[in-house]
Image (cartoon, coloured by chain):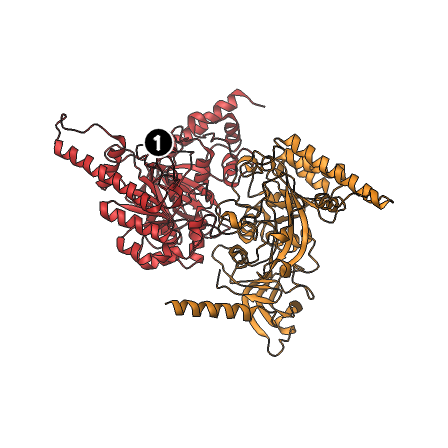
Chain colours: A orange, B red
Amino acid sequence: MKTITRFSLLVTWLIALGGAHAENIAVMGATIYTMAGAPLKDGVILLRDGKITALGPKASVKIPEGYRILQAAVVTPGLIDAHATVGLSGLLNQAQDQDMLEKSSAVQPELRALDAYNAKDPLVRWVRSYGVTTVNTGHAPAALISGQTMIVKTFGRTADEDVINPAAMTAVTLGRNGLTNAEGGPAASKSPGNRSKAVAMLRAELIKAQEYAKKREAKDESKRPARDLKTETLLRALAGVQPLLITANRQQDIISALRLAQEFNLKIVLDGCADAPMVLAQIKASGFPVIVHPTMQRSYEDMENLSVETAGKLQAAGIPIALQSSYEAYVPKTRVVLFEAAVAAAHGLGFEAALASITSGAAQLLGIADRTGSLVVGKDADLALYDGDPFEYTSHCTGTIVGGIVFADGAH
Amino acid sequence: MLNRPLLCLAALLGLTASVNAQEKPQVFTGAQIIPISGAPIARGVLVVAGGKIIAVGAADKIAIPADAEIHDVTGKVLMPGLVDSHSHIGSGSGGDGSGPIQPETRVLDSLDARDASIQKARAGGITTVNVMPGSGHLISGQTLYLKLREARTVDDLLIKLPDGTNAGGLKMANGTNSMRGANGFPGTRAKSAALVRAEYIKAQEYRDKIKRANGDAEKLPPRDLALEKMSEVLAGQRIVQNHTHRHDDILTVLRLAQEFGFKVVLHHVSEGWRVAPEIAAAQAPCSVIMIDSPGGKLETKDADWRTPAILEQAGVLVGFHTDDPICDSRRFLRSAALAVRAGMTRQGALAAVTIANAKILGLDARVGSLEPGKDADFIVLSADPLSVYAHIEQTWVEGTKVFDLSRPADHLYAVGGAGAGDSRRAQLCCFTSAGDLIANANNGGEQ
């Protein structure tokens, strides 16, 4: 018995190792949603060295000798989860695998996702098994500034090998979840105890960062301030290179986020936005994109007004959106963005826009559209294969390809 | 804008419609009917009257009563109202923090019949539901089986058994949730089982004392609310609904059920796939939860969507539950669809949200399938029940429509949005809100 288990473990390990390189692959799809133009019927995609090298109708693409051939009813770009905590909030939900929230202080922008991401957590493999190839993951929306996010491919190797943007965004939470008396919030910190204090604290931090930037320009080197990780992170937000990801669900919190952005000329990304239908015009006028709450998230407290139709309403208003799995404190320990998009598709968003919200649209929002999110020659070989409509509950993901590496953990 | 004659007219229309719903036979034509008790009928007819199903079958085989009100539901799918064997809608409660064994507590004494979660369950097509106390106790109280009729109070929702008592089970739990390690709560699994065994032995003695007293008031033991209910369990009159995740905890439940001879249903059953033959041998039904990912608590780290298929193949009676708010009542059919994705038969999965759950609650003589004589509980869907694109358009309980997606107030509860967390503004007859009346009058009254 023991020998068999050991042997099968060894085999699994060898297969895992053997598969861990980009192959030359021809993917044949009855329907290929390239997300860059109309869907392709009976098409072929060639993958080499982790990139898409050719794509077109079966008749026009010659499959070179020696290519591994994969077939699927439906092929989509690898899915992108625009906001998650996988890799930081582990499957077991025990102290040793929960790194999405440091409770010692309410304001900790210096915390990097890269220093906590566990590429081997089973939940990374779990989301990958449904077609997810890229995740914007990091610190949870559960403190005023909980830390940073990173954009990572779901290879499951190491954080450093898999990362594509180590400092993507900085997570800010307005509303009840960002307060110290919120359940699971940073108990060690007395403030913010209410909404006004939260915004006052954010403004003070941003002003401090502006002052720091000025002082850093001082001609006399001795007068320049010492390096400060916290302020450096906020400076990147002020410079527009690492935007604030502001989770705001109540309409007054959404408006506060917009007010803050205007005062400091910030580029922000709105997150959650359960009350968005009440302030559509303001969001639209701001030009900021929204990473909409998971459609199946539970509706209580700040999320009380959430709706499965919100994504569709934002899309109809011309506001750029993406969907997300967000953070779950209990069960399910992670949501799967494919399922969240499916429910949105059935409630006003429609198939193509729902698919865009977890592929091309998400890539644009995250600033990674030059390499993933659509099936175009030269982009990363990130693909998801399905045996039917990807959104149907009874379809299966039959394979996920990340950077040319095939992960087929069975029909999921 | 708001004029009195219009309001009166609307009230009259509403009242008339609801009275008609009770008296005239209602006939539903044109839909694909999935009766569960038999093969799907491509273009079926359903006849209901007096809150019961009168006839169901193919269009050419069913006589339509002359005075019937006809509902043309061509192109829709019609199936039995869903039965949820484990839910927490209505903000009910059971035992408190004072101790691990509190069978005397009743959900009955805590349920808010107007809680938004109840209307959301109607929007999800749920017509019969087992509302349970939580799982933080070894024995946390008496559960309540409800019909989701339009309701002002909990009394409007109750299911009365032939002896006049309210239908319900007894909630038990093992594993870590009840292992609080203080206040008399167990700290280990062995202690958990020992405490439960001791309680059942007490109940046996209580039962025997009553039997020996043979009606002699002098010899009767003092009434004990807890042991009374435990005695019902021992007599097989009350089913134990037992929260359990790990395979060893599942086996412990089966061991205790065998020792004391009680009827038990296993709930959640995250590791059921590991002990399917044992569950089948014990003939214990399972009410399985389908969660979007494993983990979140240690006991569910090996939860697997293949569990329903594996149990089904082993011959176990399988139902699903929402555990609302863990899973949303409005997505209950999704559990069945995900089980099919993971290998369960379509037939088994549809049964698992209807007749299997009816059996799990001991209510299969009344609900769970479309058969003459059963309660007229059914739903009308826009498409196949296992499709993500299907919308539940109507929910009927005992011949009365309790949810209609085309009514703005109901639509709100179905999809969410501002106000969907508020208590139900009940709509029928005597407690319709002014706003609904106006909308109703503008639409020409109820269909």
Question: Which residue does the image show at 57% across and 43% down from the upper left?
Answer: A309
Q: In this picture, is B307 found above or below B120? A: below
Residue at screen point 41% across, 38% down: B88
> Is residue B362 at least partly visible in the picture?
no
Give whichever of A368, B341 is nearer the camera.
A368
Q: Quadrant of the N terminus of chain B?
A: top right
Of B75 and A267, the residue lying toward us: A267
User: Please, which residue is most extreme toward the top here?
Assistant: B4
Residue at the extreme bottom of the image, as rendered: A65
Q: Is residue A93 above or below residue B166?
A: below
Sort mark 1 into few (<14), some (14-19) or many (20+) by Cα contacts within 10 Å. Answer: many
Of residue A40 and residue A235, the one placed in the foreground of this image is A235
**In the image, is B27 to the left or to the right of A345?**
left
- In the image, B230: left or right of A40? left
Q: Amino acid at mark 1?
A: Leu
Q: Quadrant of residue A305?
A: top right
Look at the numbered disc 1 and give the secondary structure of its residue.
Answer: helix
**Residue A27 makes an appearance in the image:** yes
Residue A325 vertical placement versus B21 (above, below):
below
Q: Position of residue A392 (x, y in %)?
A: 50, 55
Residue A350, percent from left and from top:
58, 50
Quadrant hosting residue B447? top left
Q: How many marks?
A: 1
In the image, farthest residue toward the front: A222
Chain on which label 1 sits: B
Task: Give the camera-side residue of A264 and A392.
Answer: A264
Q: Position of residue B259 (x, y in %)?
A: 23, 47
Mark 1, residue position: B108
